[in-house]
Image (cartoon, rainbow, N blue to C red):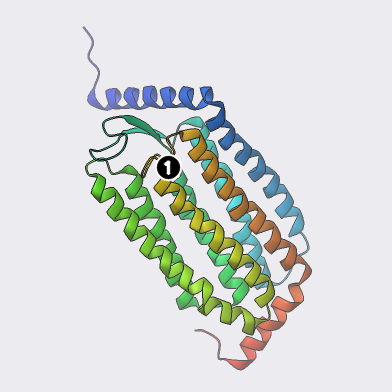
Amino acid sequence: MTTIEPVSAAVLLQQATQSDVFSQIRDDVLLSSSLWVNIALAGLSILLFVYMGRNITDGRTKLIWGATLMIPLVSISSYLGLASGLTVGLIEMPAGHALAGEEVLSQWGRYLTWALSTPMILLALGLLADVDRGSLFTVIAADIGMCVTGLAAALVTSSYAVRWLFYAVSCAFFVVVLYALLTEWADSAAAAGTGEIFDTLRILTVVLWLGYPIVWALGIEGLAVIQSVGLTSWAYSALDVLAKYVFAFLLLRWVADNERTITTSQREAGSGTPADD
């Protein structure tokens, strides 16, 4: 009689669960299409953005381009993880939830995507606005905190109240990001000569990013007003398309055509203030 070691048993269980989840995703046309459409768009965006940045030479402009290029690179990796079932799992909703006691499909890998891609969006915006390093670090740290606590809100199964508590903390981090985009960073962009494009991008970012906590609250993870995993996934995917690929295209198109503006503002800032050690 053969026995299975505990570690081997855990691996087998994980593989079986991943296989089951993969089959569930594959058989749900609405759900799977929301993932594969993003994979295709991310791939096309990578090729397009590499082409758009082919003639960029200025250092700060290259940083903006590099940060922007990371957005679809992270996304295509993440969406492949979701489509394969690697970063998707079944969790049982706690008492008090509309689907209490039922197992639901959790796309927890999305939070990993956002924790890596949204800082790149903010880094690109911060470089565009030429904000100081302290502000840039603080806002990016708040953004990562927002994503991590959002992940916790999605995965907690012990208490329905704690899920919403993590959600509230995540929203508090989000307020820090919104405040910077709407006030301090906008002033810095105006001083750097990039105010017009920054205003367009910050409005796009603020409006679309507000959609994520709304989808969470109404979707299967929150109040379950929308109980279709496929519809919820499409809502997130549609927001990602606009907040990532459309955002990145608008930014890179402007940067490629206005590299001199960015270079000039950097030189003026360098001549007016001492360099950082």
Q: Which residue extends farthest bottom?
A: 272
Residue occupying the point 72% across, 48% down: 47
Q: In this view, does 25 lie above or below 264?
A: above
Mark 1 residue crowding within 10 angstroms, few (<14) / some (14–19) / many (20+): many
Q: Please give the count of numbered marks on the rendered protein.
A: 1
The percent coordinates of residue 144 (x first, y second) are 42, 59
Residue occupying the point 55% across, 57% down: 208
Whether residue 145 can be seen here: no
Q: Is mark 1 on a helix, strand or loop?
A: loop
The percent coordinates of residue 217 (x first, y second) are 40, 48
Judge left or right: residue 201 versus residue 163: right
Nearer to the camera, 245 or 141: 245
Q: Is residue 106 above or below residue 141?
A: above
Nearer to the camera, 141 or 206: 206
Q: Mark 1 points at which residue?
A: 219
Residue occupying the point 22% across, 38% down: 95
Whether residue 47 can be seen here: yes
The quadrant of the image that shows the N terminus is top left
Q: For the residue marked with disc 1, what is the amino acid?
A: Gly
Judge left or right: residue 74 versus residue 223: right
The percent coordinates of residue 158 (x first, y second) are 22, 41
Nearer to the camera, 12 or 80: 80
Q: Which residue extends farthest top?
A: 1
The percent coordinates of residue 110 (x first, y second) are 47, 45
Q: Quadrant of residue 108?
A: top left
Q: Which residue extends farthest front?
A: 225
Residue occupying the point 75% across, 66% down: 256
Q: Quadrant of residue 13?
A: top left
